[in-house]
Image (spheres, rainbow, N blue to C red):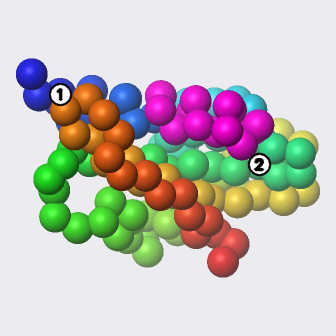
Amino acid sequence: MTATRKELGSLGESFVSTYLERCLGWRVIERNWRVRYGELDLLAENACELVAVEVKTRSFPVPGDPIEALRPVQIGRLVAALTAYAADTARWPVVALDVVAVTWRDGLVVGFRHERVYPV
């Protein structure tokens, strides 16, 4: 059975949330946080910063790198949303935007990449 686009996205976000907490030791504090600039898939904190994480999930085989699907205008909106969240809480001196690409095939993760896109 093929997952819908929404189900696939939710699978990717759950996988990345687990990766952030168990592998990196970060704490996920929000999921799908919305503001007029857009939506932040995950907001997580580590010892010194607040990180918005954009999750790009694809099923295999889909041509192209999922991270390349993130356009510069989208990065600008995500940074604006992150800035709004950080300003409301005023807890973190450093903010960052990461993107994580997850590729699924037959219910298994076959591709994974985590990159920092802001600040660069």
- Which one is closest to the eye, mark 1 or mark 2? 1
The quarter of the image holding the N terminus is top left
Horizontal relation, residue 64 to residue 118: left or right:
left
**Which amino acid type is marked by label 1?**
Ala
**Residue 45 point in image, percent of width and height:** 77, 41
Magenta residues span: 14-26
Furthest residue toward top: 1
Which residue is located at x 50 percent, y 66 percent? 75
110 relative to 32, above or below: below
Q: Nearer the viewer, residue 30 or 19?
A: 19
Q: What residue would you read off at disc 2?
A: 50
**Which amino acid type is marked by label 2?**
Leu
Horizontal relation, residue 47 to residue 3: left or right:
right
Which residue is located at x 35 percent, y 70 percent? 68
Gap in Å between the C-alphas at discs 1 and 2? Answer: 31 Å
Horizontal relation, residue 98 to residue 32: left or right:
right
The quarter of the image holding the C terminus is bottom right
